[in-house]
Image: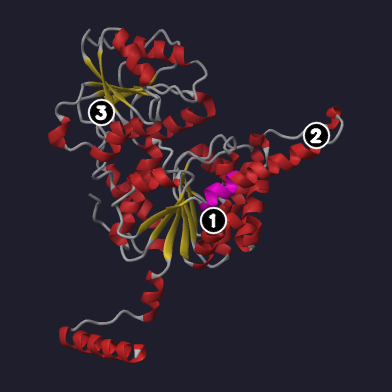
Amino acid sequence: MKAAKRAFWEQITRLYNRHYGVKPLPETEIVRRSKCHYLIGEAGYPNYGDELIAREWVKYLAQVDPEVPVVLDCLCAGPAAAICSGLHPKFSVVDTVAQMCMIDRAHIYDEQHAVSDSVEPAAAVAPTIEEIPVPQIANRVLAALDAEGLDARYAAGIRLLNNRALDMHVIGGGYMHSFWNANLARLAVAKWAQAHGKPAVVSGVGLEPLDAEDAEWVADIASHITAFSCRDMPSLDAIDSSHSYATLAPDDCFVNGLEGVYLPDEAAGDLPETMVCVQTDLVPDPAALLDHMVAVLQAWEAPAGERVGVVECIPYDSMDALRVIRDHGWEPVLFPLQNLIDHGFPARSGQRWLSTRYHPHLLAAARGCSGTFIPVKPGYYDVKHAAVLRMGSRWTQTTIGDSLIPKPGPGFADPSVRFAYRDQIRAQVAPLYGEPHSFVSL
């Protein structure tokens, strides 16, 4: 009976298709649509830049290949699923690779400390968890991808990666470097994918700080995959000094030309003239940083009672800045992270900005805002801000404790460069997603 019903409806479908000129999909396309594009990123923490990059890639894939599912692999899958919800009709989030890197690192740490506890104290030199070599973490993860029993809790994700992934795309950001060894270990999956017939691309990554051993390890990956690009010159030089198999690229946030990223013009008119984004994470002396923020605002002669916008990139990270701004007689206006995501980044031409963070510097400067940046955490944020200057910002720099405060420098000389950046990024991923499209995302 079931076979008869199936034959009947297949005949009805053929008649319908013939009458209306509908051509059935080729079998190869049916198979392709049952697979997925596999992204590795860092959305969900949440941190504005990582959310921005993930969302822009998902939006792009919704335009160029909406029929093929997209799977994003990141450590905080639950928040990432909500943050990227509704951007693609067939989008899902897993934490397979990200969690395997973290858990396998913890297992290695426990094993090494169990050994060190069993020997004489003078001989015990087990590394801290941040000192575990990246290849050691990566090799354990790769072994499990080929033998799921080694990480059986993630068998479903391992099978998805093996059986359904069409390709592998490690999206950009500054979440992979030597100090965050478990994050850096995720890169190994790109080479694994390429070796298993899945073309792999790493786009727009910032790898500094990167020690010599890790640079050599990353270089091997970069030379064995379809394409690899870095968003800053120190990262590129560290892994490929001759620039023979890796390239310099804009930040991945430009993949859609920044269309739809900003607060709409009709809502931007009421934005404060002065904006700050001053973090307290990754800062050795937050009090000194906040004092310098006040010194800058005073040097800029911000009037007492003026509204000062405070942009939050990580939840609660701006509370101290809010308090200090209020205590010094200005009126702070908070722009929470989730509002940046839901409503758009609060930058408009005519503003002046002070930022320690990378993406606020980049987006505000690209919008034509003037500003000044404060580099914190040498070897990390100074590299980031230098990359923004290379992309087109002309902001000035001030350092904590400087007595001479510069005036804000201008933003991008040519805001339309965002479209050239868009096309450059899309061209790099053409082996995965097809030739670049000229339309922009909404």
Amino acid type, callout 3:
Cys
Q: Mark 1 points at which residue?
A: 190
Q: Name the residue under label 3.
A: 369
Left or right relative to 53: residue 158: right
Left or right relative to 265: residue 436: right
Disc 2 to disc 1, C-alpha distance:
36 Å
Rendering coords of residue 56 (x, y %): 33, 48
What label does residue 117 carry, if any? 2
Protein image colouring: secondary structure
Vertical placement of residue 41 versus 296, above or below = below
Magenta part, dominant SS: helix
Amino acid type, callout 1:
Ala
Crowd tier of the residue under label 3, counting other residues whose Cα lies within 10 Å: few below 14, some 14–19, many 20 or above: many
SS assignment at label 3? loop
Question: Which quadrant does the N terminus fall into?
Answer: bottom left
- Tell me the quarter of the picture where residue 317 sits: top left
* Residue at left offset 28%, top offset 82%: 24
What label does residue 353 carry, if any? none
Can you see residue 191? yes
* Residue at left offset 36%, top offset 9%: 295
Q: Earlier in the sequence, mark 3 or mark 2?
A: 2
SS assignment at label 1? helix
Q: Which of marks 2 and 1 is nearer the N terminus?
A: 2
* Residue at left offset 59%, top offset 35%: 179
- Asked if the residue at tag 1 contacts the one at tag 3, i.e. Cβ–Cβ closer than 8 Å, the answer is no
Amino acid type, callout 2:
Asp
Q: Which of marks 3 and 1 is nearer the N terminus?
A: 1
Give 183 or 2, whichever is nearer the viewer: 2
- Give the residues drawn in magenta, as a range: 96-102
Rendering coords of residue 385 (x, y %): 42, 30
